């Protein structure tokens, strides 16, 4: 049974997500639809890129991923269908695939050109669904688009390394449901530049000199619970996606706040790693 995933910024209140699912089932009943997220911040293609990069790998090869963020067709925002890492992606050519294509080279890319056959003001519903159903039936990409070689990439998404190779200037890439702040500094980059040197991570007035593997690694469980530094513990970890993340241990954004509010960090704010002389 084909699998089609949905990632959008449509939210849960309106009819959009339900209509898309109904359109998919109208095209083919024998299909499995999986929601990745519908609460992407409006038009935030960086956030969507981070989520799709880390979600799609858990699905079987051949899965089809519809990404409905900033998807309105315009002369500067074409529609794409890609085969990449044995998965299919349908999205706008707005840089949204940049984190995925930074790791894998697309096997095939087409610019979707079936719009003249479809009257629509809602391309995710009318165009992306048609493309997904075509692929799910075993159709080739060339039937629904013309092959192209290049797609857009987001500018300023990659961290900057200084000439002395002792500093990484990164930024906030994503803020999760707990208020944890994910930076665009990967473990691979951190290890490659740092080469085992001591370091200091700076985010506004907050500093960290250790990156943990798990949240609980920051807590000394050998100390009696009432005497532990636990509530409000500030920490940095390598998260499951392989990025440096700044967090508050067991924080609740709805009550005490999360790392983003307590550290005063928002999307694209600067986070710096300084490697110290030995």
Image (cartoon, rainbow, N blue to C red):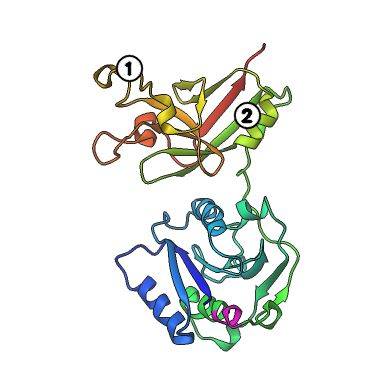
Q: Quadrant of residue 195?
A: top right
155 or 202, which lies in front? 202
Q: In the displayed structure, does residue 186 sit left or right of residue 195?
A: left
147 or 242, which lies in front? 242
* Residue beneath the point at 34% across and 36% down: 258
Q: Which residue is mark 2?
A: 168
* Magenta highlight: main SS: helix
Q: How many marks?
A: 2
Magenta-span inclusion, residue 136? yes
Q: Which numbered disc covers residue 109?
A: none
Q: In the displayed structure, does residue 101 sit left or right of residue 229?
A: right
Q: Quadrant of residue 219?
A: top left
- CA gap between label 2 and label 1 equals 35 Å
Examine the rendered structure and indicate whether residue 119 appears above or below residue 162. Answer: below
Q: In the displayed structure, does residue 241 sit left or right of residue 227?
A: right
The crowding category of the residue bearing disc 1, from other C-alpha atoms within 10 Å (few below 14, some 14 to 19, many at least 20), is few
Examine the rendered structure and indicate whether residue 214 appears above or below residue 195. Answer: below
Instruction: Choose mark 2 or mark 1, whichever is in front.
Output: 1
Magenta-span inclusion, residue 106? no
Residue 50 in the image: state x and y as whole percent: 53, 50
| Range covered by the magenta-colored residues | 133-137
Residue 61 in the image: state x and y as whole percent: 61, 66
Direction bottom: furthest residue:
117
Residue 167 in the image: state x and y as whole percent: 64, 25
* Residue beneath the point at 38% across and 57% down: 39
* Residue beneath the point at 63% across and 41% down: 158
Q: Which residue is mark 1?
A: 223
């Amino acid at each position: 049974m084909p699998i089609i995933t949905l990632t959008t910024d449509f939210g849960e209140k309106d009819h959009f997500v339900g209509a898309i699912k109904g359109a998919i089932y109208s095209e083919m009943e024998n299909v499995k639809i999986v929601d990745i997220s519908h609460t992407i911040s409006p038009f935030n293609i960086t956030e969507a890129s981070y989520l799709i990069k880390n979600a799609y790998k858990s699905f079987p090869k051949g899965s089809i991923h519809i990404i409905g963020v900033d998807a309105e067709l315009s002369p500067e925002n074409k529609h794409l269908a890609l085969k990449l890492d044995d998965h299919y992606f349908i999205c706008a050519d707005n840089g949204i695939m940049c984190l995925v294509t930074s790791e894998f080279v697309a096997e095939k890319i087409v610019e979707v050109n079936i719009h003249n056959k479809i009257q629509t003001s809602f391309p995710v519903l009318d165009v992306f669904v048609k493309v997904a159903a075509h692929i799910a039936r075993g159709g080739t990409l060339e039937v629904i688009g013309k092959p192209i070689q290049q797609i857009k990439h987001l500018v300023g998404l990659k961290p900057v390394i200084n000439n002395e190779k002792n500093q990484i200037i990164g930024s906030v890439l994503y803020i999760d449901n707990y208020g944890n702040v994910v930076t665009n500094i990967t473990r691979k980059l951190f290890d490659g530049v740092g080469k085992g040197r001591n370091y200091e991570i700076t985010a506004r007035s907050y500093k960290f000199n250790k990156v943990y593997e798990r949240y609980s690694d920051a807590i000394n469980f050998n100390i009696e619970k009432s005497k532990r530094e636990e509530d409000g513990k500030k920490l940095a970890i390598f998260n499951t996606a392989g990025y440096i993340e700044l967090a508050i241990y067991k924080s609740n954004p709805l009550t005490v706040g999360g790392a983003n509010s307590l550290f005063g960090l928002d999307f694209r704010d600067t986070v710096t790693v300084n490697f110290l002389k030995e």
